[in-house]
Image: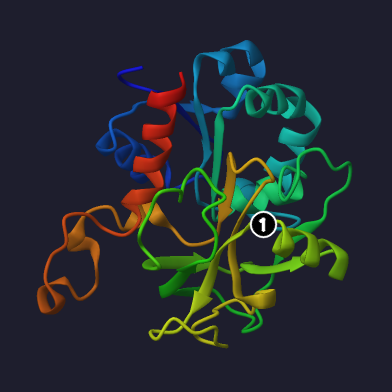
Amino acid sequence: MLKPKVVIFRTAGTNCDCETQYAFERAGAKVDVMHINTLLANKNSLRDYQILTLPGGFTYGDDVSAGKILANQIKYHLAEEITTFINKKKLVLGICNGFQALAKAGFLPDFNMPDQEVTLTFNDSNKFEDQWVYLKVCSDKSVFIKNSDVSVIYLPIAHGEGKFITKDEAVLNRITMNRQVILRYVNERGEEAGYPWNPGGSVQCIAGISDPTGQVLGMMPHPERHIEPTQHPSWTRSGLKEWGDGFLIFKNAVQYAKANF
């Protein structure tokens, strides 16, 4: 496949769809931004795509809790179609609000489990956090990270409910042992640390996880906001790299789709 097709869901409150579209197009994909009501009216249209993305934002004003209303739409109206999508070896990416929605819809950490097992809740600081963070790549299980020689990446975060927690210790142990923890917040030396390096207070500094197949990735930091090297906050002092650190997420997804479809 020369140009994999990506569909980006948007709805009221989504505000990162354009940046995410740009990132995938820079990586060589054809991208459609689709309002979720359009998909609900024609669920079969999902079959035309190889990558599904839920971008960042504040869907439905984050009423009830962040991403919860979108999560309910997915869980009660699109679960069968998205499960089929994953079973066909296709990819799903949830960024920030998209991660919150995937977690609360039960697609992470395992879409085969009947109940919600993880969530993203209010930051320990009790305020909106907007800063750049260091992230340690902890596992190559995710298709979005595979074949990368990068150990630490630098991305921005922007959330009020970014604290990752699990239902219980058993879930935490399972995703850890199964190498589903993909990204952890670290300090500039690559060491796990507290606030402000772990801005929400996530358990075990977890910033991103995958499902057991490695095809579904949810992450709170925004890779689409560090695609071009000039988006780095200190590029004039540290010099320009070829790409921003977030680009590898999109490049790997597009390369996977080209190779497999």
**Depth order, front residue of 161/216:** 216
What element does badge 1 sit on? loop
In this rendering, the answer to whether 37 lies above or below 201 is: above
Image-quadrant location for residue 75: top right
Image-quadrant location for residue 89: top right
Q: How many marks?
A: 1
Picture residue at 35% right of the left edge, 50% below the top: 248
**Depth order, front residue of 191/63:** 191
Name the quadrant of the N terminus: top left
In this rendering, the answer to whether 110 lies above or below 134 is: above
Q: Is residue 168 visible?
A: no
- Left or right: 171 as drawn, with respect to 217: right
Which residue in the structure is indicated by mark 1? 66
Q: Is residue 174 visible?
A: yes
**Depth order, front residue of 256/14:** 256
Colour setup of the view: rainbow
> Crowding at label 1, few (<14), some or many (≥20) Cα neighbours within 10 Å?
many
In this rendering, the answer to whether 99 lies above or below 49 is: below
Amino acid carrying mark 1 in the image: Ala
The x, y position of residue 126, in whole percent, is 64, 81
The x, y position of residue 113, in whole percent, is 85, 43
Picture residue at 40% right of the left edge, 55% below the top: 223
The x, y position of residue 204, in whole percent, is 66, 76
- Left or right: 66 as drawn, with respect to 219: right
- Left or right: 121 as drawn, with respect to 188: right
In this rendering, the answer to whether 47 lies above or below 18 is: above
- Left or right: 36 as drawn, with respect to 227: right
